[in-house]
Image (cartoon, rainbow, N blue to C red):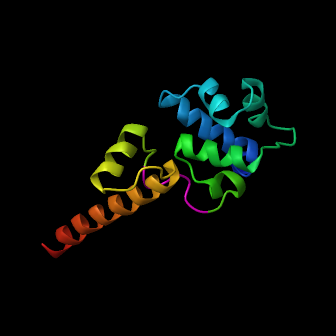
Amino acid sequence: MIRRMLQNMSTLASRVKEAIDDAELNGIKIKDIAKACGVTIQSVYQWMQEGERTEIDGSNIAELAHITGFEVRWIMNNKGAKKRIFPQVDEITLQGTQALLKLPPGLRAEQVRGLYSIVEHLTHSGTQEDAEAQ
């Protein structure tokens, strides 16, 4: 039984299903995932089907990872960390970050997310170093 569970985790379909199931627990609906990826709801269900060859465009895996907080590398080939350290950043946070950092308008969302992640990491790193020093 354990071997079967381990085998299931090694399939793309099972990792996609885990990411989507986790997203649903956090209030993200399959229709929202389908819309963000530009595919039908049926396509999303097909991605989760065991026994069939799962074919997902790389951009859809990237979008799925973005929406769910799972790492692209883990979804694609079961390597590395399962989830991102930093949660999904919503548009309000993006706008606030852009204003706070006095970033020029017109930056793409992923650029602002990257900068936000760096600032967030530096903020938390400083807190951890301060705590360790005490």
Quarter of the image with the C terminus in it:
bottom left
Q: Nearer the viewer, residue 100 or 3?
A: 100
Q: How many marks?
A: 0
Quarter of the image with the N terminus in it:
top right
Residue at 64% across, 58% down: 73
In this picture, residue 48 sits left or right of residue 27: right
Q: Read off the magenta span.
A: 80-86
Image coordinates for residue 118, horizontal then vertical, percent: 39, 63
Residue at 82% across, 43% down: 55
Q: Is residue 82 magenta?
A: yes
Query: Hey, which quadrant is residue 19 in on the image?
Result: top right
Q: Nearer the viewer, residue 131 or 103?
A: 103
Instruction: Please tell me whether the stretch drawn in magenta is mainly helix, strand or loop.
Output: loop
Residue sticking out furthest to the left: 134
Image coordinates for residue 43, horizontal then vertical, percent: 77, 30
Q: Is residue 109 magenta?
A: no
Image coordinates for residue 54, horizontal then vertical, percent: 82, 42
Q: Nearer the viewer, residue 41 or 70?
A: 41
Residue at 74% across, 29% down: 45
